[in-house]
Every structure is written in C-alpha cells, then in structure tokens.
C-alpha cells in the first residue's frame, strides 16, 4: 500500500508537522483565553478600587473662605483644570484602547469560526517551524515522540475537563489531542520503525471507534470530524507497500459503516460530506493508477456498498432531523453520490457492452423504488427526499436512453420527454417535475450541439440536425404555452424563466433552419431562403397567437428586426449582388411589410411600452434606409464608374433619402404615422453618422476630375458641402434640447461647437488637395507630411483657426471656445518646434514661423482671455 500512498501524492512528513502545528496552535489559543480572563479580572479590580476611593463632596456651608489672591487662585484653578482634563483624556484613551484589545481577544477566543480559521493558519505556520527543527536534527526521535504523546494527552485532558463549560472549544481540544495521537502512532511506525505497521493500523482503528463513541456520547461534531479524518488518513500513513487493495477498500467500507452508525444517532452533515469526499478522492486516485478489468467484481462490490451506504445515510439525515426540520434533504449527498458513482462506473464498466446503460437502469429502478417506499411509509417526513429520488430515477432512466439508442433518437426522445414532464408537472402540481422537464430539454440541446456536425446529411431539410433543432424549439414553445396558461401555479423563479423559455424555443426554431440553409446553399441563395423562412415564421406565429390566444407570441416579433438586420449585413459582406436583386426584390418588401404590420398592431401597442415601440420603429426605418442605400450603391457599381463618381453617387443617394424626411417629417403617413418627430430627432442620427463616415472615406480621394481640380467646386467637395448643409438644416430644426431627459440634455450651443469643430477638420481636405494638385505632390499622407510647403500651410491654417476661435470667444465671453483656440495655438507651437524645425531651413519654414508669429501677436492684441 506504500505504492498506493505514493500514487496518491501523500506528503506524510508534512502531514505530521501540520498536526503538530495544530497542537501548538491549540495551546496558544488556550493561552489567549487565559489572558482574556486575566485582563477582564484586572479591569474589574481597577474599577472597584476607583469607586472605593471616591468621597462625597462637603456641604457648601463648610467651604472655607479664600485666603489667597484672586490671580493666584485663578492660576491654581486653571492648572487643576488642565491636569484634570489631561487625566480624563488619558483615561478615556487608555480605556478605549483596552476595550478594543480586550474585545478583539475575547472575540478571538470565543467565536468558533475565528478559532477554526486561526487554528488552520497556525497549523501551517508552526508545522513549517517544526519540520525545520526536525530537518536540522534539533530534537531526538525519542524526545519528539514522547513530547508529542504528552502534549496530546494534556490537550485531550484539558478538552475533557472543559466539556461542560466551553463545549465547542473543548471539542476542538479533544480532536486536536486525538489527531496528535494518530500522528504519533504513524511517526513511531513509519519514520522510526519503533512499532509494526499492522499493529499501528489496528490501534488507529480502535482510536477511530473510540473517537466516534466519544463524539456521539458528548454530541461533539468537531471531535467526530477529527476522528474520521484521522481514520481516513491512517491507511495512507501506515502503508507497508503490499498493494493490498482489498484491505484498503475494506477498511474504508468499515469507516463508512462507522459514519452510518453515527448518522443513526446524530444528523451531522459535515461528517457525511467528509466521509463521502475522502472515499471518492481515494477511489479516484487509486483507480487512475491501479484499476484494470480483472478487478471488476471486488471494485464493483465496493462501489455498490459505497452507493447504498450513503443512500441510507441521506435517508437517516432527512428523518433524524429535529421536529421542525423533519424532511430536510442534504442535496450534496443525495445528488452528489449518484453523480459521482455514475462517473466512476464509466471507467469500471468500460470493457462491458451496454455496461453504462445497465448501470443507469439499475440506479433508476433503485431510486424509483425508494421513492415509492418513502411516499407510502413516511410521507409526512420524507416527501422532499422522495421527490428528489423520483427526479434521480427519472434522470437515470432518461440517461439510459442514449446509452442504448442512437444520438439522433436520444435528442428527439429527451425533447419530447422534457415537454411531457412539464405538462405532467403542471397537471399534478409538482414543481420538481417541471424543473426536470426543463433540464431535460437543456440536456437534449447540449447533446444536439455536441453532435451537430455528425447529424448533417446530404438532404437539406430532412437531416437530423434540422429536425432535432426544430423539435427542440417546438418542445420549448409547447412548455412555454402550458406554463403561461397556469401562471398562478408557478413560483416566482418559474415566472422569471417564462420569457427565457420563449426565447429559447424561437431561437432553436431559427438556429436549426439558418444553419441548415447556410450549410447547403450559396451566399445569396442562403440569405434569400432565410428571408423566406423568417417571413413564413412571422405569419405562422401571428396565426398561432390569434388561434391559441397566446399573447406572448407577439413579443417574438421584436427579434425579427435584429435577424433581418443580420441577414442584410451577411448579404453585403459575402455577396457582390444588390440586396434587392433577384428574389430579394420580392422577399425584402414582403418581410418589411410584415414587420411594419407587426409594429402597428393594436396588441403590440398594448403589450409594449410606447417608448420601446418608438425605438423599434426607428430600427425598422434604419433597416429600410440601409436596404435602399446599399441596393442603389451596388447597382451603381455595375456601371464601372470612376472612384470619385462612385463616392459622389453614394453620397447623393443618402442625401436624397434624408432631404424628404427633413422637409415632410410632420406629414408622414402609414407606416410612420405618429412617428415623424421621432424619426426626425433620433432616426436621423445614424444616417448622419453614416454621412460622417462617408466624409471620412471621401478624404482619400484627390477630387481630380478629367485632370483638373477646382477647390470647393468639384463634384466631390460639392457633395461634401451638401452633406454639411444637411447637418446644419437638421441642427436648426431641433428643439432647444435634442433629448427630452434632463440628464442627457445637450444644448444647441454645445452642438454648435461640435459642428464647427467638424467643419474645421473637413476643411483640411480641400486644403490638402489644393497643395497636392498645384504643387505637384502625391495625394498621400506620407508625401504631404514630408513636404515643407504642406507643413507651412498647415501651420498657418491652424493659427488662423486659433485666431478665429479665440477672437470669437473673447468677444462673446465664451471661455470654453477661447480655451479651445488656445489649445490649437499650443498645438501649432509644438508642431513648429518638433516637426518644422527638424527639417532644413526652407522658405516655407520661414513663412510658417513668421506667419504664426504675426498671427499670435494679433491674437494677443485682439483676443484677451474673457473674464469669468
């Protein structure tokens, strides 16, 4: 078993010193408790002495006449007052500090949680110290063992004597003493070979039984925990290298039997968890290194006993609770044990055909049988546990399906079974059954996603992936329909899940179809088929909502807009054809018409807040605008125009869309009736942002037409000026604040500054084009940056901009505008000395410096900083 211990990675020496550290830590904590009691006693004695020294004040008639001068008496009084004040302040400060320290020490000695944490910390700290002493051979083996045993007995005795006064503290001391005895026995056999290993193992078993007995008698959970932990560590610490797995697992079975006996008398959850976790951990580590199919029968027997034993412990825990807690279920044991067992079984029965299917079926029958017994014999006390067993039984029965059948049939079976469980749970009023049905549908979806690629076949619509996804969506929609019909039966979390369930069902309906279409069709055809599916789905949902009185289906339409937008984006990125080309000329108008009908329906208006509908209408307007603009732009590309004309045409198309809205937004009819102001105020925003992006793209064009360039009068810059005019008109039509909510209020003056800043930036383009064309410089950023002429023109342009901004700000008293000009002026100066000055002395450089200097003098005279 030494190989077993090594394979488990047990650092036995460090474990010894951790326990030794724990003992010393326990003694230190005991000393802390004594210090606290002594300080409290000393404080009480001081307070009593102060009270005894106080004397009553004499009557007023007995007060002697003053015999000293007034000034001397006054000085005396002031001095006494200062002394008294200092004494009171010092006394209060000392008292506050004393109370703080005393309170902290008292909390440290009395609060059980802090004691545990402090014990753990001191365990490791002192363990390292003791290990260092052992490594340096500072203590002989006899002294170490003798001292450890003496300390263990002393600590245990102190804990035994304190069991009536400080119970929790006493249990910790007793547990620490017993732990020290474990380590002492182990060290005597393993390190110093003073005792035989078999004898030490027997002694540890006796010690574990004694600890369990003391824990039950004293009702000491901490003591039982120490004993059980020591018992589980014993075979690892006393391994003789024989590799006797029967002895190892037989011993652990005995320990779990002891835990069962304790559970018969005391419902200690932490003890059950430690036993379960320790057994599972050792089984996992041993199995990883040593298990093979030849050990199937004994290992299967051990796993069966482990499983049945902890089922019994879970039942005892539920039935042995106090009267007010009868029926409480330990979920960690009830659900953790079978889930852990099924994972272990996957490795144990891997060599057997259908081994996991048989395992799942046996576990399902066992849990269903136990649930029947609990319901028939202990309904009042075991109802919750019986429901948990029913859930486990149904779950393992469900798990047996994919282990016997093909994955494709499993997806369908689980989806249908999940919907059926939801329906049965509603009929019988069983919330657990409804939850199981929803979880089963989730598992079905996980399996479908895991096997998605394998489910694809050559048939576009009749493949398992598409059918499985559609059935998953239908199962979720059926569950939602039934649940929303009986909302009064649902708990608050279930009502919260209803919208998510509806979204889940609709999502699978579209996901399965869209993925199938994307896999089997080309880019343009794929989008056309998706558009057809989306339009037909909206028609179907509309009819179902009307026939089944299912108002929640109206909410599904809100997701059609993002889906349609994604389809348009997909079409523009993966296909060169125009969106309205071919079948798109029919399908896009049909879909848009259906969406406009949806948003203008009375049921939608009643179901959604008006502000939400406004934003949805805006999104639909943006989709329509994007569809029209992109279609016209794609058609223009077919004419093989020059880049400048393509750029101009795209800008003109957007302007042609915007101008009618600016002119007639108050007189719009269906489908935008009543939304004109919203479309003008907010709907224009992304369009104007798109125009800003167009302006940015237009900067890359030189503006030359037929070899000639006319500043500000060429087609490109005229279009740019028209875009600026659109911005100005829209801005002038806005009310005082472009947004109604006060916290988002943006004044016209602020928007005006932004517009002027954008205009200033845009004027760089004709300036750069002029320099490029008339000076014969390539219209590229690198060429312009290296040109001294461009650097000089740029410096003069910036300084003139600073002059305008600072003069305007100074005359109108706008400090923000004046400061913006000052920042621009600072940028000019930095540019001059970092860029212009770095080159060789040229005429352009001289002009730049002179021009900037002169303008700065003018600024200093004409544009002083406005007063506050």
Image (cartoon, rainbow, N blue to C red):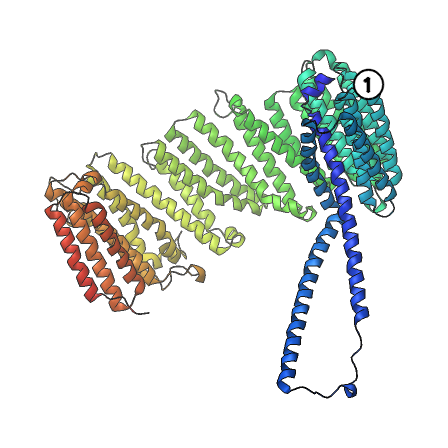
Q: In terms of image quadrants, where is residue 58? A: bottom right
Q: In the rendered view, tell whether residue 592 sits above or below residue 136.
A: below
Secondary structure, mark 1, is: loop
Please identify the quadrant where the N terminus is shown: top right
* Residue 815 rendering spot, x and y as whole percentages: 31, 64
User: Viewer-proximal residue, 428 or 204?
Assistant: 204
* Residue 222 rendering spot, x and y as whole percentages: 79, 39
Query: How dense is the environment of label 1, judged by Cα within 10 Å: few (below 14), some, or many (20 and up)?
Result: few
* Residue 665 rendering spot, x and y as whole percentages: 34, 57
User: Viewer-proximal residue, 2 or 177?
Assistant: 177
Question: What is the count of numbered marks?
Answer: 1
Q: In the rendered view, tell whether residue 735 sits above or below residue 482.
A: below
- What residue is shown at x 21% (from left), y 53% (from top)? 798
User: Viewer-proximal residue, 766 or 268?
Assistant: 268
Residue farthest front in this picture: 68
Q: Quick check: can you spot residue 641?
A: yes
Q: Quick check: can you spot residue 378?
A: no
Q: In the rendered view, tell whether residue 110 sits above or below residue 382.
A: below
The reply, left or right, for residue 785 in relation to residue 601 is left
Please identify the quadrant where the C terminus is shown: bottom left
Residue farthest top in this picture: 294
Give the residue at mark 1.
Answer: 196
- What residue is shown at x 52% (from left), y 37% (from top)? 507
Q: In terms of image quadrants, where is residue 341? A: top right
The reply, left or right, for residue 659 in relation to residue 854 is right
* Residue 211 rendering spot, x and y as whole percentages: 85, 33
The reply, left or right, for residue 736 in relation to residue 729 is right
- What residue is shown at x 52% (from left), y 52% (from top)? 608
Residue farthest right in this picture: 217
User: Viewer-proximal residue, 64 or 323?
Assistant: 64
């Amino acid at each position: 078993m030494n190989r077993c211990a090594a394979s488990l990675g047990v650092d036995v020496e460090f474990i010894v010193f951790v326990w030794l550290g724990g003992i010393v830590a326990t003694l230190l904590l005991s000393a802390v408790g004594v210090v606290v009691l002594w300080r409290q006693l000393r404080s009480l004695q001081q307070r009593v002495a102060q009270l005894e020294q106080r004397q009553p004040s004499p009557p007023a008639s007995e007060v002697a006449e003053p015999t000293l001068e007034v000034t001397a008496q006054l000085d005396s009084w002031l001095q006494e007052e200062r002394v008294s004040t200092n004494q009171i302040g010092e006394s209060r400060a000392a008292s506050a500090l004393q109370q703080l320290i005393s309170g902290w020490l008292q909390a440290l000695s009395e609060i059980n949680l802090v004691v545990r944490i402090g014990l753990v910390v001191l365990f490791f700290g002192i363990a390292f110290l003791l290990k260092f002493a052992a490594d340096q051979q500072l203590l002989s083996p006899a002294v170490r063992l003798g001292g450890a045993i003496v300390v263990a007995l002393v600590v245990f005795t102190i804990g035994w004597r304190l069991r009536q006064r400080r119970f929790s503290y006493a249990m910790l001391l007793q547990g620490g003493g017993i732990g020290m005895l474990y380590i002492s026995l182990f060290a005597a056999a393993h390190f110093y070979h003073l005792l035989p290993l078999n004898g030490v193992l027997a002694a540890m078993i006796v010690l574990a039984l004694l600890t369990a007995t003391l824990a039950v008698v004293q009702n000491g959970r901490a003591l039982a925990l120490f004993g059980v932990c020591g018992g589980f560590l014993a075979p690892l610490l006393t391994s003789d290298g024989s590799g006797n797995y029967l002895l190892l697992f037989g011993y652990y079975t005995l320990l779990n039997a002891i835990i069962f006996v304790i559970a018969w008398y005391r419902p200690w959850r932490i003890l059950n968890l430690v036993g379960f976790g320790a057994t599972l951990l050792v089984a996992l580590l041993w199995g990883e290194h040593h298990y093979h199919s030849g050990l199937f029968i004994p290992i299967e027997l051990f796993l069966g006993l482990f499983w049945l034993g902890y089922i019994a412990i879970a039942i005892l825990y539920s039935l042995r609770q106090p009267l007010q807690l009868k029926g409480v279920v330990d979920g960690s044991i009830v659900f953790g044990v079978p889930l852990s067992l099924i994972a272990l079984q996957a490795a144990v029965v891997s060599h057997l055909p259908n081994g996991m299917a048989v395992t799942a079926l046996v576990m399902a029958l066992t849990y269903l049988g136990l649930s029947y017994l609990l319901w028939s014999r202990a309904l009042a006390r075991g109802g919750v546990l019986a429901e948990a067993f029913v859930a486990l039984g149904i779950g393992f029965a469900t798990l047996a399906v994919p282990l016997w059948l093909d994955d494709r049939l499993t997806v369908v079976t689980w989806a249908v079974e999940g919907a059926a469980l939801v329906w049965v749970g509603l009929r019988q009023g069983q919330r657990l059954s409804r939850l199981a049905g929803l979880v089963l549908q989730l598992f079905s979806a996980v399996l479908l996603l895991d096997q998605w690629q394998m489910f694809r076949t050559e048939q576009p619509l009749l493949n398992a992936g598409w059918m499985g996804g559609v059935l998953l969506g239908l199962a979720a929609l059926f569950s939602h329909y039934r649940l929303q019909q009986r909302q009064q039966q649902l708990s608050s979390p279930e009502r919260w899940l209803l919208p998510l369930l509806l979204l889940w069902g609709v999502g699978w309906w579209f996901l399965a179809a869209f993925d199938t279409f994307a896999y089997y069709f080309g880019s343009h055809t794929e989008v056309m088929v998706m558009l057809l599916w989306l339009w037909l789905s909206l028609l179907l949902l509309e009819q179902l909502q009307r026939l089944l009185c299912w108002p929640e289906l109206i909410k599904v339409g809100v997701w059609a807009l993002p889906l349609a937008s994604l389809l348009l984006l997909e079409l523009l990125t993966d296909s060169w054809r125009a969106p309205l080309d071919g079948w798109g000329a029919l399908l896009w108008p049909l879909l848009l018409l259906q969406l406009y009908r949806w948003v203008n329906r009375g049921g939608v208006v009643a179901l959604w807040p008006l502000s939400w509908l406004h934003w949805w209408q805006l999104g639909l307007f943006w989709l329509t605008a994007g569809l029209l603009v992109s279609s016209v732009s794609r058609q223009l590309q077919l004419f093989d125009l020059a880049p400048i004309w393509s750029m101009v045409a795209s800008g003109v198309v957007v302007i042609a869309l915007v101008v009618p809205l600016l002119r007639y937004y108050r007189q719009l009819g269906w489908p935008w009736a009543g939304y004109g102001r919203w479309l003008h105020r907010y709907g224009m925003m992304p369009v104007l942002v798109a125009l800003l992006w167009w302006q940015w793209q237009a900067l890359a064009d030189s503006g030359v037409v037929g070899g000639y360039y006319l500043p500000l009068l060429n087609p490109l810059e005229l279009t740019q000026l028209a875009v600026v005019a659109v911005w100005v008109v829209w801005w002038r039509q806005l009310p005082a604040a472009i947004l109604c909510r006060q916290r988002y209020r943006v004044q016209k003056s602020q928007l005006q500054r932004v517009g002027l800043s954008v205009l200033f930036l845009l004027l760089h383009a004709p300036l750069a084009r002029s320099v490029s064309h008339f000076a014969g410089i390539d219209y590229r950023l690198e060429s312009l940056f290296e040109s001294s002429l461009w650097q000089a023109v740029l410096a003069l342009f910036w300084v003139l901009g600073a002059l305008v901004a600072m003069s305007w700000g100074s005359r109108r008293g706008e400090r923000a505008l004046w400061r913006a000009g000052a920042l621009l002026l600072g940028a000019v100066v930095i540019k001059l000395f970092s860029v212009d000055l770095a080159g060789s002395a040229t005429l352009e450089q001289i002009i730049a410096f002179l021009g900037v200097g002169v303008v700065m003098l003018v600024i200093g005279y004409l544009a002083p900083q406005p007063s506050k």
